[in-house]
Amino acid sequence: MTTTFVASFRTEALSTLGQHGILTTAQLHTIVTHRTGRSLCVGSCRRSLAKAEKAGLVTSVSRTRGPEKSWYLTSGGFEAVAGTISNPLKMNAAIATGPTAAHLGVVNALGVRVTEALGLAAEVSWTHEQPLPLGSGRYLRPDAVLNVLTQQGGELVGGQWFVEADRGTESTGTLVDKLVNYLTYRNYRPTAPGDRTKAELHWRTRFRDWPDIMFAFDCPRAEKRIQRFSAWAGNDPRLEPHWGKLNVAAIASVVDVDPTKPLLQIPTLSRKPWLA
């Protein structure tokens, strides 16, 4: 293992933390080795992070009972990656140990699990909470937009999802309201005051195709929560005429995510491949 590669790993780790806010040692190891295509043992990863911590670039918290740490950038770390990444996620000790980081952890666990499952041949990326306009000064902020490009049956296939993480802290009605907001965004056309021209649908300026919507549940009795959510959404009059416009899916466990197996479709609870 060359000193240059270890230094390169540390640089990639800093950039990755800037993009995703807070990650465990194992998650950083998965993302960076997948991105670089080079092998680095977890022990070397820990030593590299320890050196970055000693240099004042990163710091850590223990979010679980086990020995694994979760890392985030210090102000010095952000200065080190300034200008190299867009929309960085800033952290501090209060955020890193609070509910925001726990919610972010569900999203990052999903992205890392998909990365692991699809392997080095796939390209997997996700961005966090990018604002999407709904009109009248309102915005929709998906927890993430997940992108996948991989080989399937000898062909290159891709998928894109709006991701909503659910830790069981919101009402079922709130989850249904989020779907209504996605429908609003799908139909939104920006117009300037006094301009009556028909503008292009905003989502077409951001995405090649309309993404599917994925609710990632990470809470007790997730299966029952999905069933209740599906029933409410299926009977909501705001959504009922428009199911042809929305492809909505749910997963009951982020830890057990397997993109080679089908997703549960909302509101039918039928199964559909990730990459159809």
Image (cartoon, grey):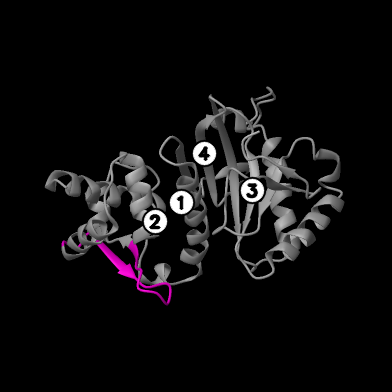
Q: What stretch is highlighted in magenta?
A: 55-71
Q: How crowded is mark 3: few (under 14 residues within 10 Å), some or many (20 or more)?
A: many
**Tag 2, which secondary structure?**
helix
In space, the residues marked 1 and 3 are separated at their CA atoms by 16 Å
In space, the residues marked 4 and 2 are separated at their CA atoms by 18 Å
The mark closer to the camera, 4 or 2, is 2
Q: Name the residue under label 2.
A: 27
Disc assigned to residue 147: 4
Between 19 and 260, the one lying in front of the other is 260
Whichever of labels 3 and 2 marks the residue nearer the N terminus, that label is 2
Disc assigned to residue 214: 3
Horizontally, is 33 left or right of 105 in the view?
Answer: left
Residue 90 seen: no
In space, the residues marked 3 and 2 are separated at their CA atoms by 21 Å
In space, the residues marked 3 and 4 are separated at their CA atoms by 12 Å
Between 109 and 140, the one lying in front of the other is 109
Who's the residue at 78% across and 50% down the image? 269
Disc assigned to residue 10: none
The mark closer to the camera, 1 or 3, is 1
Using the image, determine if residue 189 lies above or below residue 266. above
Q: How crowded is mark 2: few (under 14 residues within 10 Å), some or many (20 or more)?
A: some
Residue 25 seen: yes
List x then y, in percent, for residue 210.
64, 33
Q: What amino acid type is highlighted by mark number 4?
A: Asn
Whichever of labels 3 and 4 marks the residue nearer the N terminus, that label is 4
Disc assigned to residue 112: 1
Report the quarter where the C terminus lies.
top right
